[in-house]
C-alpha cells in the first residue's frame, strides 16, 4: 500500500509520532514460544522461567512471552482479508482497536471524535475515558425507508475540520443495516485531509461482499475494524483486527501493550481462520441469516410490534409499546435481550440477538403465551 503522504502523522498526537516504542524482548527477538525456536536458542533476555509450569500442556510454551504480533495469527488473518501483514494489527477485540485509535489521534481535552448515533456505545466511552470530546451527527431514516438508518451527509459536511476521528458502523449496532457504500465514500472524501474515518465491520461476515476493506489502498484515512467475536463465535477469546495503512498501523503499534495477544489466543484464533474454520463460519452465517429472516417475519405478524428494523447482522431491533412487559416477561424466564430505548430515536426499542433455533422458538412461545 502506498504512503498516505504522511496524513496519519499529521493527524496523530505529536508525542506518539516522536515516540520510540518500548523495545520489549520479543520485539527485539521474536518466536520464543514456538517449540522449535526454544530448542535452537537460549532465551535469557526477558526474565522468564526457563521451563514449563504445571499448567502448561504438551506442545505449549507458556513460560515465554508471546510475540508482539504472533506470526501465525497475522499470516492467517492476512490470507483471510487479502491484505499484507503490515496493514494488520491484532488486538484484544475490536474494542481495543477503538481505544487505540482514539489514544493515537486525539489529544486529551483538545480533540474530538465524531459518532453517528444510534451507534455502538464504546466509541463514546473510550473517548470519555481519554478526555476526547464527542460530536454527534445522528443517523437519519434511509431514502423513503424508515426501517433503515443512513448517514446525514449534509450535517457531516458541516463538521469537517472539527473531529480527528469519525466512527461509522456498518452494519450498524444497534439498528443492524449496512451503510450505503456511496455514503461511506462521501465521508472518506469529505474528511480526506482532516480525519481518520473508521469503518467498524464487526458484523461484516453476515454480509461479506459489502466490506470496504479493498478501499484501503485508495483512502489513506480509512481504518477498518474487525473481530472474531461475532460470526467466528469467539467472543470469549478477545481477538480483533485493525486494518489500515502501514503508517497508521505503525502509530497504533506504539500505543498498544507490548504483548497484547497471548499465545493460546493466537493459536486458537489461527485455527478459526483455517479453511475448515472458515467453512464453519460460512455455515453459521447462513443459518443465522435464515433464523433472522424468519424471526423478522414472525415479528411482523405480532400486534404488539410496531416496527422492525432491517438487519444485515446477527440481531434484530424492533419497536414495541410493550417494551417493558416483553423485556420483563423474557427476563422472568431467564432470557435476556437488550433494551435500546435510551439511545436517541430508539424509544421503545429492543434488540434481540439471533441465538439458536431452540432459543428463538422459546422466545416466540413465551411471547405468544403472554401477549396474544
Ligand atoms: C459494532 C461493534 N464494534 C465492536 C464491538 C466489539 O467487539 P469485540 O468483542 O471484538 O471487542 C462490538 C461488540 O458488540 C460491536 O457491536
Image (cartoon, grey):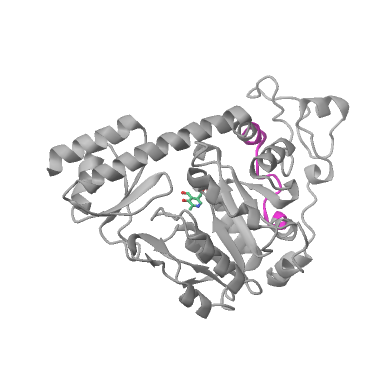
Q: Position of residue 43 (x, y in %)?
A: 84, 33
* Residue 185 horizontal side relative to residue 341, left or right: right
Q: Nearer the viewer, residue 49 or 286?
A: 286
Image quadrant assignment for residue 98: bottom right
Q: Position of residue 282 (x, y in %)?
A: 51, 34
* Residue 207 horizontal side relative to residue 87, left or right: left
Tell which residue pokes out farthest to the right in this image: 41
Tell which residue pokes out farthest to the top in this image: 58
Q: Is residue 130 visible?
A: no
Residue at 69% x, 68% y is: 12
Q: Is residue 258 above or below residue 37?
A: below
Residue at 36% x, 32% y is: 356
Magenta extent: 253-267
Q: Is residue 277 above or below residue 115?
A: above
Image quadrant assignment for residue 118: bottom left
Q: Nearer the viewer, residue 213 or 346?
A: 213
Q: Nearer the viewer, residue 132 or 353?
A: 353
Tell which residue pokes out farthest to the left in this image: 372
Residue 75 among magenta residues: no
Q: Which quadrant is the C terminus positioned in?
A: top left
Q: Position of residue 319 (x, y in %)?
A: 26, 55
Q: Position of residue 88 (x, y in %)?
A: 69, 49
Amino acid at each position: 500500500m502506498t504512503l498516505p503522504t504522511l496524513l496519519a502523522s499529521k493527524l496523530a498526537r505529536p508525542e506518539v509520532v516522536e515516540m520510540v516504542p518500548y523495545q520489549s524482548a520479543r520485539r527485539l527477538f521474536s518466536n520464543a514460544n514456538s517449540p522449535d525456536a526454544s530448542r535452537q536458542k537460549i532465551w535469557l533476555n526477558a526474565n522468564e522461567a526457563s521451563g514449563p509450569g504445571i499448567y502448561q500442556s504438551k506442545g505449549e510454551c507458556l513460560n515465554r512471552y508471546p510475540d508482539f504480533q504472533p506470526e501465525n495469527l497475522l499470516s492467517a488473518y492476512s490470507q483471510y482479508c487479502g491484505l499484507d501483514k503490515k496493514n494488520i494489527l491484532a488486538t484484544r477485540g475490536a474494542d481495543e482497536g477503538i481505544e487505540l485509535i482514539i489514544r493515537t489521534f486525539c489529544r486529551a481535552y483538545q480533540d474530538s471524535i465524531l459518532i453517528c448515533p444510534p451507534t455502538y456505545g464504546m466509541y463514546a466511552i473510550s473517548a470519555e475515558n481519554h478526555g476526547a470530546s464527542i460530536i454527534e451527527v445522528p443517523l437519519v431514516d434511509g431514502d423513503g425507508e424508515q426501517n433503515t438508518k443512513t448517514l446525514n451527509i449534509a450535517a457531516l459536511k458541516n463538521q469537517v475540520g472539527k473531529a480527528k476521528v469519525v466512527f461509522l458502523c456498518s452494519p450498524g449496532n444497534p439498528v443492524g443495516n449496512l451503510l450505503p457504500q456511496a455514503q461511506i465514500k462521501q465521508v472518506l472524501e469529505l474528511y480526506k485531509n482532516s480525519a481518520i474515518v473508521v469503518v467498524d465491520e464487526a458484523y461484516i461476515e453476515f454480509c461479506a461482499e459489502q466490506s470496504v476493506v479493498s478501499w484501503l489502498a485508495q483512502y489513506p484515512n480509512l481504518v477498518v475494524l474487525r473481530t472474531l467475536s461475532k460470526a467466528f463465535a469467539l467472543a470469549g477469546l478477545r481477538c480483533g483486527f485493525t486494518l489500515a495503512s502501514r503508517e497508521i498501523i505503525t502509530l497504533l503499534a506504539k500505543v498498544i501493550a507490548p504483548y497484547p495477544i497471548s499465545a493460546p489466543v493466537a493459536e486458537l484464533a489461527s485455527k478459526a481462520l483455517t479453511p475448515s474454520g472458515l467453512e464453519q463460519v460460512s455455515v453459521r452465517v447462513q443459518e443465522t441469516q435464515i433464523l433472522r429472516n424468519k424471526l423478522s417475519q414472525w415479528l411482523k405478524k405480532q400486534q404488539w410490534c410496531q416496527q422492525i428494523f432491517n438487519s444485515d447482522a446477527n440481531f434484530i431491533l424492533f419497536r414495541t409499546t410493550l417494551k417493558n412487559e416483553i423485556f420483563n416477561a423474557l427476563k422472568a424466564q431467564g432470557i435476556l435481550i437488550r433494551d435500546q430505548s435510551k439511545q436517541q430515536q430508539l424509544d421503545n426499542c429492543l434488540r434481540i440477538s439471533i441465538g439458536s433455533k431452540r432459543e428463538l422458538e422459546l422466545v416466540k412461545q413465551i411471547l405468544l403465551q403472554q401477549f396474544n
